[in-house]
Each structure stands twice: as C-alpha cells, then as structure tokens.
Image (cartoon, rainbow, N blue to C red):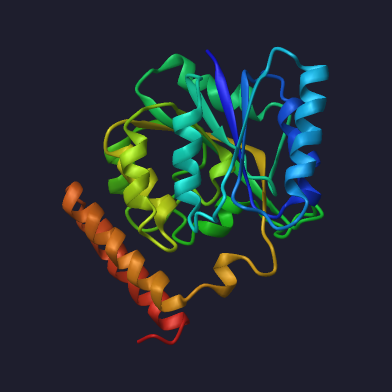
Amino acid sequence: MSVSVVVPNYNYAKLLSRRVASILNQTKQIDEIIFLDDCSTDDSLEVIDKEIQKIRERNPDIKIQKIVNKKNSGSVCRQWAKGFKAATSDYVWIAEVDDLAEKSFLEKTMAPLLKDDSILISYTESVVVNPKNKPVFKRNLRRTLEKKRLGHWARSYVADGKKELQDVMCVYNTIPNVSAVVFKNDARYEKILEKAAEYSIAGDWYFYVQLLLIGKIAYINEKLNRYCVHSDSVTKTTDKRKYLEETKELHRVISEAVELPTKSKKNLIKQEQYLARIWGLE
C-alpha cells in the first residue's frame, strides 16, 4: 500500500534537511512527499527546493509536491487538511519538521493498518526531545502523561474507536504528537478538519475524536517517534483559560457522541478541576 508523507513547515529551515533524511531513511519506502510551507519568513523555501532536487536525483520514483501559502493559515489543522487533500496515497503520515523518527517507524506503524482496513489511526510511543534531539524526560512520554496509571498503554493493541473514547481519549488528548501517527487516507477528513480549525488549541484532539467515532485505533508500544518540544511551545505560552475552555468543550462533544461509563464521567470533572486548580482559574 502507498504512503504519502506531509511535511508542514513554518520557519524551520534549520531543521528541514534533518527531517527529510529521517523520512527517506525509513525501512518502508515512501511513495510521495508533500511540502507545505505556511508563509515562512526565513529561508525555508530555498532549503525545500534544495531537498526536492536531492530527492529527484536520489529517489526519482518518489512523487513530490510543494504547496506554498501566500498568507499564513493560522492553523495547523488547515495545513493538515491541505495535506490530506493533496495526498494521492492510501495512507498519510504528517511528519512535522521539528520531529524525528526511528528507521522502522513507518514499517511498524503501518503494520496494523495493512491487516485491518477499518483502522483509521495507528500511532506509536514517543520520546520527548529538545531541538538538539536530546531527551527531555527520563521516562517515556506515555508514563509522563498517564497520571492515573490505567495500564492502558502497557502493550500494543487495536481497539474500537468509540471504546477508546469511552476509556481514555474522553479525558484528554492521549495522542500528543501527530508525527507519531499514520492515518488511513479518507475524503471525510476535509470537513472534520474545517471544524477542528475553529479551535485555538484542541483542534488535533477534536480531529482524533471524530476519527474514533467512525473507525478503529492501533497503538504500537515502541518508542519510534521523537517529539520535539521548544522553550516557547504551546504548552508553556498558551492562554490557560482558553485551554481549559476548549477542554470543557471537547468533554461536552465527546459526552454527547458516546455513552461514557460513570468512572470516565468522574474523570472528566476531575481533569477540569485539576487544570483550574494548577493554573489558578478556580
């Protein structure tokens, strides 16, 4: 099955070559690479052109697209929508420029998708790194996020999407980095992402939720994605009140879409109270 790699970029000229190398070094060869530039103000376009030339010389079988915005989109979800619309392959990997992947990432993450056509999301565990590719946490990302120690991610699995929502995704976004995901391509995503773009912070969470309502999810319990965080990342500089508001809105959306067990309903309230307390918004 074919795979398109979407590379959204905004002012990451210094990291582009490293990311492209990470993509081309995969044990599963890609079929298409789509560069999306969101009106960068650095020399990203020049670097992209150089990378395209290298790909054409060394990997002539790979299709290449370059889509450049004349005006900044203001939303990663709008960029993702463009990527899905442009992709010509069966599967799509959104590989953000500042992240990296182990060589076997694509091969192992696509394995469940190739066995079960109803899986829309397949993702792997991540290691959090800084821009110099140095680990930030001693523990892996999953253990850092899983405050409630549910044991849900102790092993690889395939799950019904609605069941995943009921059990864990209803409380917070349990897929913290899109670079860790391979999606089955689907024309329905365009409208979903249009709505997701209305969120300032939780658009990715909304997108995953909508996919889980119509398909399955697979998780690979291997640290194959390297998720880069920056000192000025969204989690550190965002409007905390807006984050809390959008968390409550996603809780409402999910609660209306699926019947949540009592334990999950309680966890929604606890999460809202926790965010309000640690950010002084009570």
* Viewer can see residue 21: no
Q: Residue at x 41, y 82 (%)?
A: 277
Q: Residue at x 65, y 30 (%)?
A: 105
Nearest the viewer among 218 and 70 is 70
Nearest the viewer among 66 and 196 is 66
Q: Is residue 261 left or right of residue 36?
A: left
* Viewer can see residue 276: yes
Compared to residue 280, the image places residue 238 above or below, namely above
Q: Position of residue 101 (x, y in %)?
A: 70, 37
Quadrant that contains the C terminus:
bottom left
Q: Residue at x 72, y 52 (%)?
A: 12
Q: Position of residue 10 (x, y in %)?
A: 65, 53
Q: Is residue 195 left or right of residue 182?
A: left
Q: Is residue 258 left or right of residue 177?
A: left
Q: Residue at x 60, y 24 (%)?
A: 108
Instruction: Indicate the quadrant where residue 48 lies.
Output: top right
Q: Is residue 32 left or right of residue 91?
A: right
Q: Position of residue 60 (x, y in %)?
A: 74, 14
Compared to residue 123, the image places residue 262 above or below, namely below
Instruction: Indicate the quadrant where residue 93 lies.
Output: top right
Compared to residue 226, the image places residue 273 above or below, namely below
Q: Position of residue 254 (x, y in %)?
A: 25, 52
Nearest the viewer among 85 and 270 is 85
Compared to residue 97, the image places residue 203 above or below, namely below
